[in-house]
Image: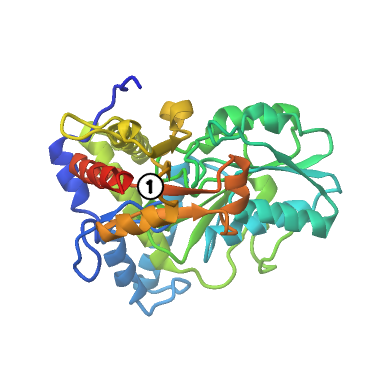
Amino acid sequence: MKKRNVEFFPKELHEKVSGEFAYLNEDFRGKKRLFFENAGGALRLNSVVEEYARISALPDSPERSHDIAKDIQKIIDDGKRDINRFINADSGAVATSLTASELMFEMIATAASESEPGNIVTTEIEHPSSYDACQFSAEKYGHEVRVAQADKSTGSVPLENITELIDENTRIISVILTSNITGAMHDMEKYSNQIREKSTDAFIIVDAVQGAPHAVIDIKKWSVDGMNIAPYKMFGNRGVGFAWMSDRLASLPHHRLIATEPTNWDLGSKTPAHYAAFSKVVDYICMIGEFYRKSDDRRELIVEGMNRIHKQEQAILERLLNGSENVIGINKIENVSVHFEKANGLNQDLILALTFDNIPNSEAVDHYGKENILVYARESSSHYSKRILEAVGLDSIVRVSPIHCHSEEDVDIFLEVTKRISEL
């Protein structure tokens, strides 16, 4: 395969970036390891952990009039602004919940319950939180479910496979931004705008959980009504999910305190530390952006930072596939196959779906573990994986998912171990 023109972070920036993460090179017991499992677990920033602990310790309620209460309310307001900056939204509503999956169920169920019986269009590679939400809501509120087929070579869903299912009775279209199994990335600006041409009234709801840490999100360019993200996937905390909703979706009847605004989706007291932690994530992205350009505009720095993260991850992907002068890449290692990437190129997230010819994939994962490399076997025996794997014609894969803070040396260690496993 022809090598692509890719660009690693300069050494100065990489040293800065790698120093920001907790347990990057060793686990909490002090054991050295490579954490190449960021599509499942996720590395998180030291600043996030520290800020969350600091704000969580405050006993004060933000819904009071004294000075500390006002400071806490400002943290919440700043956090919401940072969420909107990150996705480039200046309208609509932000909702929080314990998980992004809960928010997906809430958005789809709300849209389905307030729509006349019709059909809901989803895809074969949707995460269970969105696919199952479509199935559940269809059964409860009298809709038909239509499922767009995936392309087995790319692991994505061609746009025409979605649009051909849309008609005047389509109420909801659920489309994933990036698959956490195949790594395929959908061009949501193109997809949503063409979907909107087929249906001006249907609610378009996007699962952006896997895509958010790896590329720019721009709600102003997307014709969508709902989208969820999970901070833990993007260097932040577990225990919270965020969703953005258009005013049209947010104002539909839903669980809320009656005295609040019709677009309010917050029930009970907010958790200020979650907002403070997300602002630290945005600070980090802006730090990367500032390395390349000077700006007082936080959104501009977010865009620059996310574009640089994407370029760094494409450089890591290139080295994984084609190796270097010192070590051969996976494309040249016998008994190992790489799925989807060849067809996707730069539209591939930093996820490698590997299969081994010489040993079962689950056994390969165990061998990686013995070499202190953490990867994961996605298998059809799992309800999280079965439908998606079957859609792309596979029974199991070894999923390899590093992120931008990993180094060229990390990649070479992984490749050396992969070659040894291929020779067992």
Seen in the image, is 196 located left or right of residue 366?
Answer: right
Count neighbours of disc 1 (C-alpha within 10 A) and say few if under 14, some if 14 to 19, many if 20 or more.
Answer: many
- Picture mark count: 1
Residue 342 is situated, as x and y percent measured from the top left of the image, at: 44, 28
Work out whether residue 264 or residue 151 is closer to the camera in this orientation and state it: 151
In the rendering, at what x and y percent does residue 90 appear? 52, 42
| Residue 304 visible within the image | no
Q: In which quarter of the image is residue 213?
A: top left
| Outermost top residue | 2
Q: Residue, x 31% and y 35% (percent of image)?
A: 333
- The residue lying at 52 percent from left, 66 percent from top is 98
Q: Nearer the viewer, residue 250 or 348?
A: 348
| Residue at 56% across, 59% down | 382
Q: In this view, which residue lies farthest toward the left?
A: 12
Residue 246 in sight in this render: yes
Task: Indicate the quadrant where residue 356 lies.
Answer: top left
* Secondary element type, mark 1: strand
Q: In this view, does 371 lie above or below 216?
A: below
- Tag 1: amino acid: Val
Quadrant of image for the N terminus: top left
Q: Which of 96 and 45 is in front in this view?
A: 45
Residue for badge 1: 400
**Where residue 259 sits: x, y (%)?**
67, 67
Tell me if residue 120 comes above or below residue 344 in the rendering: below
Q: Which of 172 and 249 is in front in this view?
A: 172
Residue 81 coordinates in the image, percent (x, y): 44, 50
63 relative position to 170: left or right? left
The chosen color scheme is: rainbow
Instruction: Decide if residue 411 is on the left or right side of residue 159.
Output: left
